[in-house]
Image (cartoon, rainbow, N blue to C red):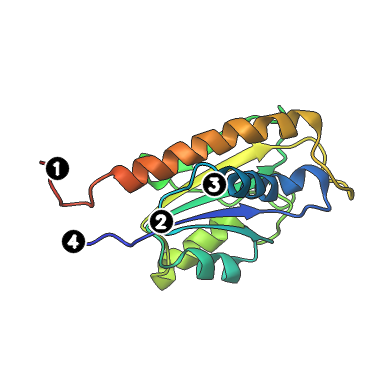
């Protein structure tokens, strides 16, 4: 059985809403680092506003989709990143309206819809980064900004592990 090819890293957010721009900041730093430490061939780095239709279009042919978005739970620990993966099981649940996301129809719904349409990637890894401020304005708060380099290293590791892993049903010799 062949697995879908390529990886896409999708940074969701809005750079004009403070910490909601963390997904975009992660993609920007990945791009910068890739000039000196190239990512595996077939890796796409994209920024998205989180529209479910666009998300599905970005990830539908990927073997691995890594999605980074801000979340705003209460209470919050700004900069803390939560990781969820289809490999670890469990369903990504929709958030209550305006509870932990700035998107009304969000990532969980896009994954559900993509699954029903047969347009999900082979594997999904989601990083939700707790933010402190999503008011209008530019720039991440210090706690969220300091979390970006650590998160980028984790994502680079996810990409390299996926790229090195044999396809399902293929035995390593």
Residue at the disc numbered 1: 172
141 relative to 157 in the view: left or right: right
User: Cβ–Cβ below 8 Å for labels 3 and 1?
Assistant: no
Q: Tell me the residue that label 4 is attached to.
A: 1
Report crowding for label 2: few under 14, some 14 to 19, many 20 or more residues within 10 A (C-alpha): few
* Label 4 vs label 1, nearer the camera: 1
Q: Which of the two discs, 3 and 1, sits closer to the camera?
A: 3
Mark 3 or mark 1: whose residue is earlier in sequence: 3
- Cα gap from disc 4 to disc 1, whole angstroms: 14 Å
Camera-nearest residue between 96 and 4: 4
Q: Residue at 62% across / 52% down in the picture?
A: 11
Evaluate whether residue 75 shows in this view.
Answer: no
Q: Which residue is mark 2?
A: 41
Q: Quadrant of residue 159?
A: top left
Kindly identify the residue that appears in the image at 22 percent across and 62 percent down: 2
Residue in view at x 41 percent, y 60 percent: 121
């Amino acid at each position: 059985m062949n697995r879908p090819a390529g990886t896409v890293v999708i940074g969701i957010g809005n750079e004009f809403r403070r910490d909601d721009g963390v997904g975009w900041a992660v993609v920007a730093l990945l791009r910068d680092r890739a000039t000196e430490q190239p990512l595996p061939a077939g890796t796409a780095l994209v920024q998205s506003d989180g529209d479910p239709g666009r998300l599905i279009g970005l990830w539908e042919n990927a073997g691995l989709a890594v999605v980074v978005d801000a979340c705003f739970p209460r209470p919050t620990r700004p900069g803390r990143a939560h990781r969820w993966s289809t490999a670890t099981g469990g369903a990504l649940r929709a958030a209550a309206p305006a509870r932990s996301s700035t998107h009304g129809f969000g990532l969980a719904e896009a994954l559900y819809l993509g699954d029903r349409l047969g347009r999900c990637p082979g594997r999904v890894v989601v990083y939700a980064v707790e933010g402190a401020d999503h008011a209008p304005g530019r720039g991440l708060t210090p706690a969220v900004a300091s979390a970006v380099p650590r998160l980028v290293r984790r994502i680079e590791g996810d990409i390299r592990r996926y790229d090195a892993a044999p396809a399902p049903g293929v035995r390593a010799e």
